[in-house]
Image: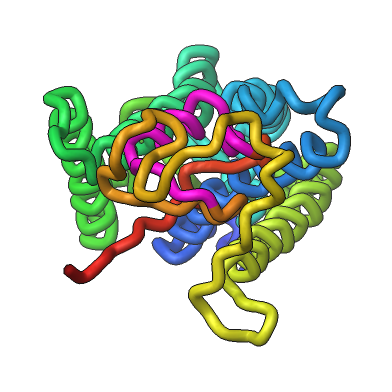
Amino acid sequence: MISSSAITSQTSFHVKPSIFDLVAQDSMSELIQPSFRKIINYLSTKNPEKYGWMSKWVDECFLGFNVLVQRFCLVHCSASFSELMYKLRRVATSGDPRSNDRLPWRQEMLSLLCLTLVPHVRNKMEAHVETQRNTESETKIAKVLKLFLFLSSLSKLVHHIFYLTNRLETHSPLLKLCGVRLTYATDEYTHTNRFVSYLTTLVQVGALSVQLLSTWVNHDTDDVILSPGGGRGYIPAPPPGGLTTCAPVPNNVCPVCRKRFRIPTVLATSGYVFCFQCIAERVQTSPRCPLTGIPSSIEDLIQVYSHK
């Protein structure tokens, strides 16, 4: 007679991960880069001579950091950083979920590319589309990228629906491309690999830190538009004229292009007004205010609407 614990252990391999766990780990993975960016901005502000270059190449720095972290997790645990948080692991689509073996080399390399390079390229696409969105003439490249991003999101939604209806074994097109699927890491797998157990604990601490940093990012974003009295709509006054590196410009003239404003936009970190396209391109190439040198990003842009 087979014991009940053995039956439970055997059937647990066939339990599909909950869609809530899968979506939650996807959301967790999206929090890592904003938290990393916040750390880089803090370091570059405290010590610009030593860390200032990192704010200019923050996306590339994160790509290198992400490659190291994800590669480490894939090699030792067959899972990504965020998947470890929810005790998930990757197995080959044609493989046995009860096997504790490492992923095949091909699936491991494809997983690494989809966890690191694909999000990096997607973020670059989204930034370009955001830059071109409110310009007078949107480029053809921006329109193509916008369509591609839409189709990508639609494909992800379709995979979610098919996963819920048991038509697909994966909830993401990237997992299908890698030839892997997600399953819950069993207690046997965790206990036989003590390193996985320790790393899972470390990941949980790291995930908590990421969530705290994400709260810090959102809190600072609110503080930018909070007035000292508690009201909203406040933009900090520009620093004294001696701090600017450009000659004074007349009202209604962009300090960058020296022409009348086209889609006037405030850079919230400094309080200066620019053309949207001018300041968007500047903070993309060099993430600082062109007048004050204060670290800034595309998220700090606030468009000004006037009623004539």
Q: Position of residue 16 (x, y in %)?
A: 42, 56
Q: Position of residue 236 (x, y in %)?
A: 62, 63
What number of labels is visible?
Answer: 0
Horizontally, residue 305 falls left or right of residue 200, namely left
| Left or right of 272 in this view: 122 | left
Q: Is residue 131 above or below residue 113?
A: below
| In front of the other: 241 or 199 | 241
Chain part drawn in magenta: 272-291
Query: In which quadrant of the rendered image does the N terminus lie?
Result: bottom right
- In the picture as drawn, the residue positioned furthest to the top comes out as 105
**Residue 260 seen in render:** yes
49 and 175: which one is in front? Answer: 49
Colouring style: rainbow
Figure quadrant of the C terminus? bottom left
Which residue sits at x=58%, y=30%? 246
Answer whether residue 192 is visible to the viewer in this image. Answer: no
Residue at x 35% of width, y 41% of height? 275
**Residue beneath the point at 52% across and 79% down:** 232
Query: In which quadrant of the rendered view does residue 305 lie?
Result: bottom left
Magenta stretch holds residue 214:
no
Q: Relative to 65, is 224 above or below? A: below
Q: Does 33 sit left or right of 125 as displayed?
A: right
Q: Position of residue 162 (x, y in %)?
A: 21, 54
- Point out residue 207 in the picture as x, y percentages from the top left corner: 71, 54
